[in-house]
Amino acid sequence: MTDTAHAAGPVRRLAGILHRRPRLQLSLLLSAPLAWLVLAYLGSLTVLFLSAFWTTDAFTSNVVKIWNTDNFTALFTTDVYRQVALRSVGVALAVTALCVLIAFPVAFYTARVAQPRWRPLLVVAILTPLWASYLVKAYAWRLILAQGGLLEWLLGPLGIKGPGYGLTATVLVLTYLWLPYMVLPIHAGLEQLPANILDASADLGARTGRTFRAVVLPMVLPSVAAGSVFTFSLSLGDYIAVQIVGGKTQLIGNLIYSNITLDLPLAAALGTVPVVIIVLYLLAVRRTGALSSL
């Protein structure tokens, strides 16, 4: 009985300290996941960046830990790497723009037009493609875009040829893959939009286009920014869809993947490119103030 009382004493004192100091309690609760983030994620990025300064033995292909900047010099001086980096950014921006154009009417219908009882089912329908395997969806699109495939069969009577495999097919498939990540944030933003603001805009004589530009878009911009972070980053780092439907198209992810076994330091240097681009993109989005209310 005495031993139990002695053991309970420190526990009660610790509980009292944590109760009086909620910030200390929150810090202890977050210490484990933050430690994991620092060690697993930031630690791996640090190792990636450091290994980019190493070199590879030309005869054995073994990594030689000799510090130099040859890999980064090659990135800036080789035309292929610059072209692939610019192409990757262009694809990511194109996918993001297409996702915004498609997601807005879909999200507006699910959030403002559809009856409340149907809205949860519509959200589930939007999420349904995410339940399927990435490879299944990508190879399904390969069959659709193939010569003599479904898309060519549908466009044939109109005298239009399908895009086939290439850059257009890559943008199309990536747009399909990441579209739900844009629809859901915009849906949430439109759902929180007060109805009386739209009514007030209509009462003041504003037409649909003016209401959208002056009322809806500024209030939903944080949701668009949040969705664009997903679509941009996921498209920039993708390399599997490009291999399946891209034909001869090369993006930065393909170069990283192809150099992992041949020249690991060069692959690490290439891997820093999308990381830097995404960080700059996040800073640009944050500077616009679009993420301040998220």
Image (cartoon, rainbow, N blue to C red):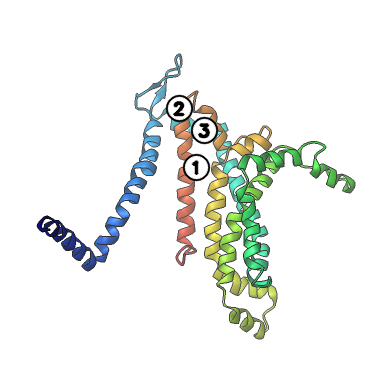
Determine whether 187 is above or below 33 in the image.
below
Q: Which residue is mark 1?
A: 274
Pointer 3 with pointer 1, Cβ within 8 A: no
Residue 12 position by quadrant: bottom left
Choose the circle earlier in sequence order: 1 or 2.
2
* Residue situated in front as seen by the camera: 123 or 269: 123
- For the point 39% across and 40% down, the residue is 45
Binning the other alpha carbons within 10 Å of mark 3 as few (below 14), some (14 to 19) or many (20 upward) gives many
SS at badge 1: helix
**Where in the figure is residue 144, as x and y percent of width and height?**
76, 42
Residue 20 position by quadrant: bottom left
Q: Which residue is mark 2?
A: 264
Q: Which amino acid, mark 3?
A: Ile
Determine whether 276 is above or below 53 in the image.
below
Placement of the N terminus among the 4 image quadrants: bottom left
Per the model, the C-alpha gap separating discs 1 and 2 is 16 Å
- For the point 61% across and 34% down, the residue is 250
**Where in the figure is residue 251, as x and y percent of width and height?**
59, 37
Please indicate whether residue 221 sits to the left or right of residue 166 in the image: left
Pointer 1 with pointer 2, Cβ within 8 A: no
- For the point 63% across and 37% down, the residue is 242
Choose the circle earlier in sequence order: 3 or 2.
3
- For the point 82% across and 42% down, the residue is 152
* Residue situated in front as seen by the camera: 84 or 15: 15
Q: Which amino acid, mark 2?
A: Leu
Of all residues shown, which one is farthest toward the bottom?
203
- Circle count: 3
**Where in the figure is residue 281, as x and y percent of width and height?**
49, 52
SS at badge 2: helix
* Residue situated in front as seen by the camera: 67 or 48: 48
Q: Which residue is mark 3?
A: 256
